Image (cartoon, rainbow, N blue to C red):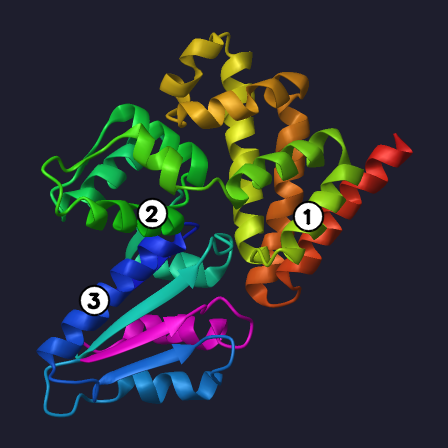
Amino acid sequence: MILFFYGEDTYRSLVKLKEIKAKYIDASLGDTNLAELDGRSVKAADLAPQIYALPFLAKSRLVIIRDAFTKTIQEELQDILPKVPDTTVLIIFESGLPDKRLKLFKELKKFAKVQEYPLLAGNLLNSWIRQFLSRWQVEIEPTALRELVERTGGVTARLATELTKLATQLLSEPSRVIVKQHIVEQVASSAPTSVFALTDALLRSPSQALKTLRQLLGQGENAQYLVAMVASGLRSLALIRWTLDQGHSPADIARVTKLNPFVVKKQLSLARSLSLAEITSSYRRLADLDIGVKHGTIESSLALELFVGSKLAFSQIA
């Protein structure tokens, strides 16, 4: 069996990976038949011995390959996929979005059970939050939910931390309901709000964007996370602009696009000031740089600096 997990919501995909790994270790009485390989450092010649190896006193082996979309192992791996034995469960785990034009991606779509983990928004994100809270039998009021999403930017990793904190505090309370006051008092706005500012500045004032970017990196924000969030912001902008171009009213945008209302509220003004072509051009440029990051040919922080720098150079020429 081959499983292929990928997507921008690395938190949810990692949770799934950890669940499978934990169940396998419990069922196999240990990690004797577990192999975890890093695609960025493993040698191509070492793939086949690990994948073809017979399990020891068990029915199967579990082999996990993280970040397989590197130049060093792509060709070897795509040749192995059709020949993975029934005694091996192979999981290909890719953080972020791989280049779907690559042969390895096409081969995985053919031979693997594929699960994409996109960034959640709108009703899908709201449902995920309520489902996450259900393990404690805790509920959340609509106004509290909206406030929480706005303060966290809808990032599931941050949401999981805040929801766990809020829910466990209510376990001894007679009413297990999170209200807006809980959010206001205990959840601080963080990087996502600044990411909106970064995306806005990229398209309105590239010189300010460079300052904002360096400030975020100086505060310790993860560059790869910023790439994903800016890309998500550009996609949201494109959806909003497209919806406006189709003649929909601003009040209908959240319903038509399935975007969270707070995202629409934050980005509506910027979307109105730009054409769809301008937004998609920026997104393609960032996507090309992100592919370079995934392939290991460029670091995330440098990719962001180049992206911002290209916008700045263009604005000065214009």
Tag 1 residue: 213
Residue 243 image point, x, y percent? 49, 17
Q: Nearer the viewer, mark 2 or mark 3?
A: 2
* Circle 2: element type: helix
Which residue shows up at 59% across the image and 54% down it? 290
Residue 299 appears left or right of 17? right
Q: Nearer the viewer, residue 10 or 102?
A: 10
Q: Is residue 178 magenta?
A: no
* Circle 1: element type: helix
What is the C-alpha distance between the residues marked 1 and 3?
37 Å
Tell me the number on the disc at residue 162.
2
In the image, what residue type sits under mark 2? Glu
Q: Nearer the viewer, mark 1 or mark 3?
A: 1
**Which quarter of the figure has residue 140?**
top left
- Near mark 3 (Cα within 10 A), the count class, few <14, some 14-19 or many ≥20, is some
Quadrant position of the C terminus in the picture: top right
Q: Earlier in the sequence, mark 2 or mark 3?
A: 3
Q: Earlier in the sequence, mark 1 or mark 2?
A: 2
In the image, what residue type sits under mark 3? Ile
Q: Decide: marks 1, 2 in contact (CB < 8 A)?
A: no
Tag 3 residue: 20
Total of numbered circles in the picture? 3
Residue 77 image point, x, y percent? 41, 74
**Chain part drawn in magenta:** 61-86
